[in-house]
Image: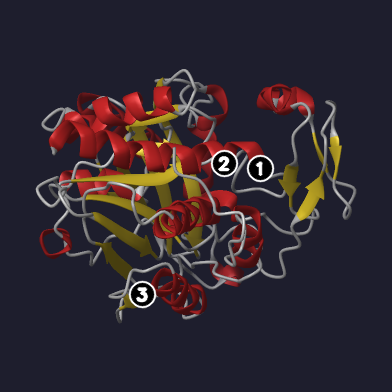
Amino acid sequence: MLDRQADSTFPTLVDRFVTYAKIHTTSSDESDTYPSTERQFDLARLLVDELKAVGLADASVDDNCYVTANLPASPGCEKVPAIAFISHMDTYPEVSGENVVPTFHENYQGGDIDLPNEGRKILAAENPYLAKCIGETIITADGTTLLGADDKAGIAEILEALTIIHENPDGKHGPVKIAFTPDEEVGAGVKHFDVEGFGATVAYTMDGGQRGEVENETFCADSAIVTFVGRDIHPGYAKDKMIVSVKVAGDFIASLPREGAPETTEGMEGYIHPISIKGNCSETEVQLLIRDFDLAGLRPKAEMIDKYAAAACEKWPNSSYKIEIKEYYRNMKYDLEKEPRAMAYALEAVKRAGMDPLQGSIRGGTDGSTLSAKGLPTPNIFTGEQDFHGYGEWICAKDMELATDTILRIIEVWCEKES
């Protein structure tokens, strides 16, 4: 198997990750630009330089902040279909990603992990996967920010795999394409991505969790925007006239059952989730997420939202509401079934990397959800990232090494099976 050269001058896998984690790339769901934050270009430009340094001479970043590059096939492997590896550069906007301080916990021996600041801890009881990392190095933030392993671990692993290929020029591989995207965390990661121009047959997002996992399912996702309309009157003269739309919306939110909410569901169960409310006396807008692994499960949830909105308005005579359902993304399994090699070769690669493959589903979405729908089958591969989107985010360095090996094995399997 290909490996790093002893006299390598390139940064190590972990050093790359630490460098990326320190770059502020948080996206914004309140922006009307693309990408949503200009700071994502800071990492993009660095990645272009690093891709060129490991031999991908055509690496570039476009006006949409898409970093793309091509690794040409080695001699004799030109007929192998082009495959791609994709990770996103932005971090989750609801927890700070600025001034990240990667913190190392060497030779982890179990139990809770104390973070240096804010009195925060990573609780072993809430992170059972820690038990698989005994004796390994755990990387966290310092308690004041998220870590950014989602998805800078994926970027580091892709660059590490490319470095190994660069240092072993006699290795065999088909054509490999790379893309690093912005704004995945706000649902717009591949909004302007040119799938046809990219030219890959299959892609893999490096954006998953525990070692050995390959995910081929995501939620089907819609959003609901419910707007409640009241009547504003000067409060000094409001008796029997004013209808406060905020109160109507409050009754609606309070009426939603806990059963079928994110905090009471797991596995393959869907949910309804109110995520924001904004408005005034006259008009108040409530935004909700609708999720279900089965496409047919979305409609009953939308009807339930409509029912509870109508019931809230009945409590407030002369109030009204309107509801808008927006399609977000669909379960990628429907599209992956059209290209069975994508999953079969990935699972084989995990085995070759010495792990038991775990075929899983994502209680969320990835860039791969949209890419698969656009005609580019894109399963999701583990990176090691854990407890993401919070101050307690962490990753095991060993998992990053295994993810890198898996990338190399996927390239190997495609070359063997298709040349």
The answer to whether any part of residue 228 appears in the image is no
Residue 115 percent across, percent down from the top left? 85, 47
Return the mark for residue 202.
Answer: none
Residue at 85 percent of width and 27 percent of height: 109
Q: Disc 3 marks which residue? A: 65
Quick one: 174 or 51, which is closer to the camera? Answer: 174
Quick one: 14 or 165, which is closer to the camera? Answer: 165
Dot 2 lies on which element? helix
Dot 1 lies on which element? helix
Q: Disc 2 marks which residue? A: 401
166 w.r.t. 286: above or below: below
Q: Amino acid at mark 3?
A: Cys
Classify the position of the C terminus by image quarter: top left
Classify the position of the N terminus by image quarter: top left
Q: Disc 1 marks which residue? A: 397
**Which label lies toward us, 3 or 2?**
2
**Are the residues flagged by discs 1 and 2 in contact, CB closer than 8 Å?**
yes
Choose top left, top right, bottom left or bottom right for residue 15.
Answer: bottom right
Residue 273 percent across, percent down from the top left? 46, 38
Q: CA distance from mark 3 to mark 1?
A: 28 Å
